[in-house]
Amino acid sequence: MTPARPPAEYLRFAYTTLQRLLDACRTAFFRALVARMGRQVRISRGTILSCPRRLVIGDNVFVNMGCMLHAEGGLSIGDDTEIGPYTVIWTTNHVFDRTDRLIRAQGERHAPVVIEPDVWIGASAIILPGVTLGQGAVVGAGAVVTKDVPPYGVVAGNPAALIKTRAAPGEDDELTRAEAGARPRRTRST
């Protein structure tokens, strides 16, 4: 005879199973709205899609809870990308150049956001219009990305700055902080 599972374990299992079922239903609903969605895509609860007809999502993409994906200017998410919770991706910005007109009367500028394959975007990051995240890039939690990120680049901060570069396929070692453009760390003399 097998020992009985504690009730907390059953509740955890039931909750996890229900969340996965709801994610599958949500993803199926969004699949009907977007321009194209690949296989094995998972979109978690609380995610908002704005202008989904301009959104293209590749294979094996995970969008965590509470994200805002604004695709009016065009948004492409490459294969094998992970987007952390509460991330915001904008493809539109207000025009505010003239001071003789109200900002709301000056219109908007649209610029596509391109996320290449194998990108990891940390929690609560903000990606602004016109940005391309290169293949294998990593965006730190809370970063505000205003400029392109090179392939295998790691960025963090507000505004996001390159802090290191991951080793690309075929390279032996990671680049040092100095090679990535950051100030070298001090080493202790012995």
Image (spheres, rainbow, N blue to C red):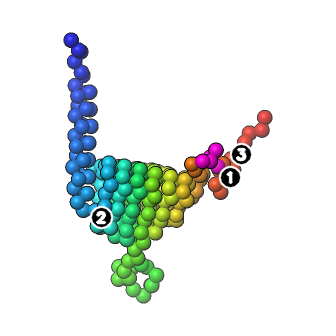
The extreme right residue here reads: 190
Provide residue 113's location: percent of width, then percent of height: 43, 65
The extreme top residue here reads: 1
Q: Does 64 sit left or right of 10 as displayed? A: right
Element assignment for label 3: loop
Labels 3, 1: front one: 1
- Determine the main secondary structure of the stretch shown in magenta: loop
The quarter of the image holding the C terminus is: top right
First along the sequence among labels 3 and 2: 2
Labels 3, 2: front one: 2
Q: What residue does disc 2 label?
A: 35
Instruction: Give the amino acid type for the residue marked by disc 1 in the picture.
Output: Ala
Q: Which mark is residue 186?
A: 3
Residue 49 appears in the picture as rendered: yes
Residue 166 appears in the picture as rendered: no
Residue at 21% from the left image edge and 49% from the top image edge: 25
Neighbor class of circle 1 (other Cα within 10 Å; few <14, some 14-19, many 20+) is few
Q: Nearer the viewer, residue 176 or 118?
A: 118
Q: Is residue 45 above or below residue 189?
A: below
Residue at 45% from the left image edge and 84% from the top image edge: 98
Instruction: Give the amino acid type for the residue marked by disc 3 in the picture.
Output: Arg
Labels 1, 2: front one: 2
Quadrant of the rendered structure where residue 155 is?
bottom right
Q: Is residue 106 above or below residue 178?
A: below
Q: What residue does disc 1 label?
A: 178
Question: Marks 1 and 2, Cα distance to the nearest angstrom?
Answer: 42 Å
Question: Marks 3 and 1, Cα distance to the nearest angstrom?
Answer: 11 Å
Element assignment for label 2: loop
Question: Marks 3 and 2, Cα distance to the nearest angstrom?
Answer: 50 Å
Residue at 68% from the left image edge and 52% from the top image edge: 178
Residue at 50% from the left image edge and 56% from the top image edge: 135
